[in-house]
Amino acid sequence: MRFFRKAKRTDGWLTLSFQGDGVAAAFVRRSGAAQPVVEFCSTFPGPVEPETLARIGKELHAGTFKCSTLLGGRDYQLLSVEAPNVPPEELKTAIRWRLKDMLDFHVDDATVDVLDIPAEANAPGRAHNMFAVAARNSIIKQKQELFVDAGIGVSVIDIPEMAQRNISALMEPEGRGLAMLSFGEDGGLLTVSYKGELYLSRRVDVSLAQLAEEDFERKTATFDRITLELQRSLDHFDRQYNYVSVAKLMLAPSPAEGLADYLAGNLYTPVERFDLGGYLDLSAVPELAAPEEQQRYFLLLGAALRQEEVKL
């Protein structure tokens, strides 16, 4: 199974992911120029096993949808590598060779896919980078078998960076890049997108519990760590992609009271909080108006916003 497989239909994706308390599912339908419509979003409590998943699939009529699932942040590695100068049919082999000393497991045990980072338009022929996604074969096999045993045809395994990119793309100012920061079960995720493409990804090792800390000194120390990581990452991005001007940093809903104001006062990049209701039609799922629900389902909804990817 490929991470980024071409979609055959364009009416939306039913995305299922595994969370600590069960299986979460969302369906988002895109409708031309109008806001994408969240038609369904919920969690089914219980153990993650084929019988439970089969029941959920039956209840949701999963067989009538294009279905995808989402890897957890610890299930894979995302690495930026220089794009090899080889024919397309040799790309995967060349990338595997470059990854052999970069992974924390043997490359022969990896499922690998690639995602291009577009080169500067005014510098044709200049070397550019691409993302390599590598996951242990055992993790991919386990997920595949779980869905096969449940009778659900999952055609895409996606990653959080691409899910966040999908939401970021809805907000990008014309001709400028957009940074986005979210927090979930796997900590923080910073991305920068430009013209709908993912250019930067950084993990921020801060938990939801640390964000919700009430002690002033500990909260301030956490905010300092986040600020330092963001500043370093954005400075690095500016040096590497000086042709992309980052308009602002968008902060996804989170339990971090005061973080947006803190970042705004300590970063040179403008900072804004946002509500998903400004970019998605949430009328069919009114409970998503609550910030805590938006934070809970943020990446799941992003994955369900998936559109056709370019096959490399």
Image (cartoon, helix red, strand yellow):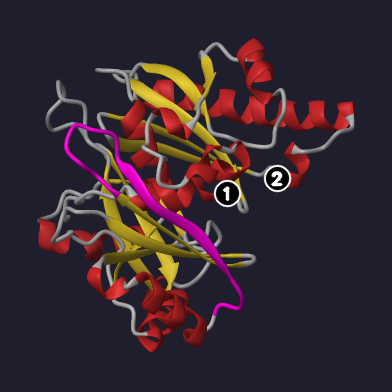
Residue 88, image x, y percentages: 12, 57
In magenta stretch: residue 46: yes
* Apparent side of residue 126 relative to residue 176 in the rendered image (left or right): left
Please indicate whether residue 221 sits to the left or right of residue 197 in the image: right
Provide residue 94's location: percent of width, then percent of height: 24, 60
* Residue annotated with mark 1: 296
Please tell me which residue lies in front, 73 or 132: 73
> Is residue 183 within the magenta segment?
no
Residue at 23%, 70% in the rendered image? 64
Q: Position of residue 129 (x, y in %)?
A: 30, 41
Query: Residue 61 at x, y = what percent?
Result: 32, 73
Q: What distance separates the C-alpha of mark 1 from that of mark 2? A: 11 Å
Residue where numbered disc 2 is placed: 208
- Residues drawn in magenta: 29-48
Q: How crowded is the residue under tag 1: few (<14 C-alpha within 10 Å), some, or many (20+)?
A: some
Q: Quadrant of residue 7?
A: bottom left
Q: Secondary structure at mark 1?
A: helix
Q: Residue, x 64% and y 66% (percent of image)?
A: 21
Q: Residue at x 55, y 11 (%)?
A: 268
Circle 2: residue type: Leu
Res 308 visible: yes
- Residue 142 visible to an observer of this rendering: no
